[in-house]
Amino acid sequence: MTEWFIYRGTGQPDPERIGQLPAPPPWRAFDTPAVDYDVPEPGSSTRRRLGARTVPLPIQDAGTLELVNASLYLRRPLLVTGEPGVGKSTLAHSVAYELGLGRVLEWPVVSRSELRDGLYTYDAIGRLQDAQLPDAQLPDAQLPDGRGAPDIGRYIKLGPLGTALLAADRPRVLLIDELDKSDIDLPNDLLNVLEEGAFAIPELERIADRTPVVEVLTDDGRRVAVQEGRVRCRAFPFVVMTSNREREFPAPLLRRCIPLDLRAPRDERLAALVQAHFGQGAYDDNHDIVDQFARAETDGALRPTDQLLNAIFLAQYAARDAAHRREEISDLLMQPLDRGPR
């Protein structure tokens, strides 16, 4: 019954046992590149991450499709609410994948996040330290300008929001993940930037008369030219802001967004989710665990879909010697969000 155990709790060293671990589930493989949506290539080796980096799935719900398209037409952010694990962040990747809009720019919000974090960062200390070095120790690209300081563009990097607002013919997809985790000011601070589609970099505005064009680094790792210290979009990005309903947002922000309340995937969408991660036929092979997952939710306690995927993956190894172990293992992993392990 315990042949699949790697760690056995015996207290006896056995360093060779770690080599018995199978390949990780696709959403926990870190040695393959993240999905790039510029040129979709079905069957290519890409990392399938749960949540924000999961393989995009078809969206069959008509109401969801209508609101996503309304956001695209109106150039308004999409505010997606729902319980954890229902696929809110996946929606941004689905749009980027289908429309070929490139890598999704992701801004994971935390309690300390400020608007400037999403727009750009400026390493003033690094520039000051480099300015004190002899010219011979600086790379050619950082040689001092007329005032004796290294090229300021080397110390400015646009954040995900700032990169999304660069002038381009095709919109980028920006995911502002878990906005409800921010402090009280960030939602209001976003209003002007989202309304105007532009922002200023004061450090570059101050030198615009001497250096009107400065190259800065983007969130993609590319260098782009910023003119006179201002960034203004040409095609407004497709912005997805997610919320786990942990707080209310100010009315001015809600007025500027298209609201979408996302429900947990079920039926055909749940089948597509399982098959996307485990391959064709995986849904039929694991219908017992899927049925168990569906029955578990009849008690009214929410169970996110990543628990289902974890249970299917682990059951493939834990239940090789006894079929009834599948249900035991899946029951162990699929816990409701409102209470911990039993």
Image: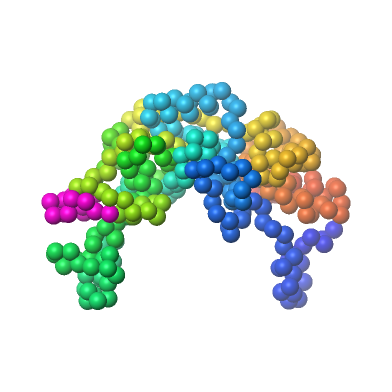
Q: Where is residue 131 in the image (x, y as percent from the top left)?
A: 22, 70
Relative to 265, say whether 15 is above or below.
below
> How many marks do you count on the picture?
0
User: Residue 191 in the image: x percent, y percent?
Assistant: 31, 36
Q: In this view, does 185 lie above or below 300?
A: below
**44 horizontally vs 150: left or right:** right
- Drawn side of residue 240 relative to residue 322, left or right: left
Q: Nearer the viewer, residue 11 or 224?
A: 224
For residue 50, side relative to residue 325 (left or right): left
Q: In which quarter of the image is residue 164?
A: top left
Could one spot residue 288 in this view of the protein?
Answer: yes
- Could you tell me which residue is drawn at 30 percent across and 33 percent down? 195
Q: Measuring 68% from the left and 30% from the top, which residue is drawn there?
A: 268
- Is residue 254 found left or right of 266 in the rendered image? left
Residue drawn at (72%, 50%) of the image = 313
Of the 4 image quadrants, the one containing the N terminus is: bottom right
> Who is closer to the viewer here, 195 or 97?
97
| Residue 231 lies in the magenta stretch | no
The magenta-colored residue range is 201-215
Q: In this view, does 131 lie above or below 215?
A: below
Q: Where is residue 296 shown, x and y percent of the image?
A: 72, 37
Residue at left offset 52%, top offset 42%: 39
Residue 118 in view: no
Camera-nearest residue between 263 and 336: 263
**Where 198 sits versus 222, above or below?**
above
How is the rendered protein coloured? Answer: rainbow
Looking at this view, name the residue that lies furthest to the right.
322
User: Can you give x and y, in whole percent of width and height, for residue 14 in the image?
Assistant: 74, 74
Quick check: is 213 in the magenta stretch?
yes
